Image (cartoon, rainbow, N blue to C red):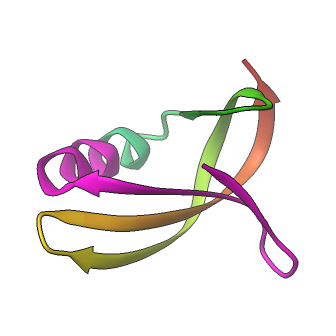
């Protein structure tokens, strides 16, 4: 889900399985664009700042996005 944060800008937020979280970090760590989708469309952006909260078998991940491009 894309959410707007007044101070940070555009933020992607999702609950991610622990195994998928590792893949997400590796993908973004290599400088790859993160592709996110919501009801208003699909976007590709650089992951800039991360917030992570453990939720049992999942991680609540919030990522501030930059250089957003419509996919």
Q: Is residue 38 left or right of residue 19?
A: right
**Residue at 48% over, 40% down:** 31
Among the 4 quarters of the image, the one containing residue 59: bottom left
Q: Is residue 10 above or below residue 31?
A: below
Q: Quadrant of the C terminus?
A: top right
Q: Is residue 8 magenta?
A: yes
- Res. 12 image quadrant: bottom right
Side of 45 relative to 35 (left or right): right
Percent position of residue 14, x then y: 45, 55
Q: Residue furthest top?
A: 71
Would you say residue 20 sits in the magenta stretch?
yes
What stretch of residues is rendered in magenta?
A: 1-26
Residue at the (21%, 44%) spot, across then down: 20
- Residue 37 spot, x, y in % from top left: 62, 31
Viewer-nearest residue: 16 or 35: 16
Reply above or below: 42 against 6: above
């Amino acid at each position: 889900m894309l959410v707007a944060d007044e101070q940070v800008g555009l933020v992607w937020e999702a609950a991610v399985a622990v195994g998928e979280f590792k893949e997400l970090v590796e993908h973004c760590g290599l400088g790859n664009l993160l592709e996110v989708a919501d009801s208003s469309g699909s976007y590709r952006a650089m992951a800039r700042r991360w917030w992570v909260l453990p939720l049992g078998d999942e991680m609540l991940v919030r990522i501030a996005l930059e250089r957003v491009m419509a996919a």
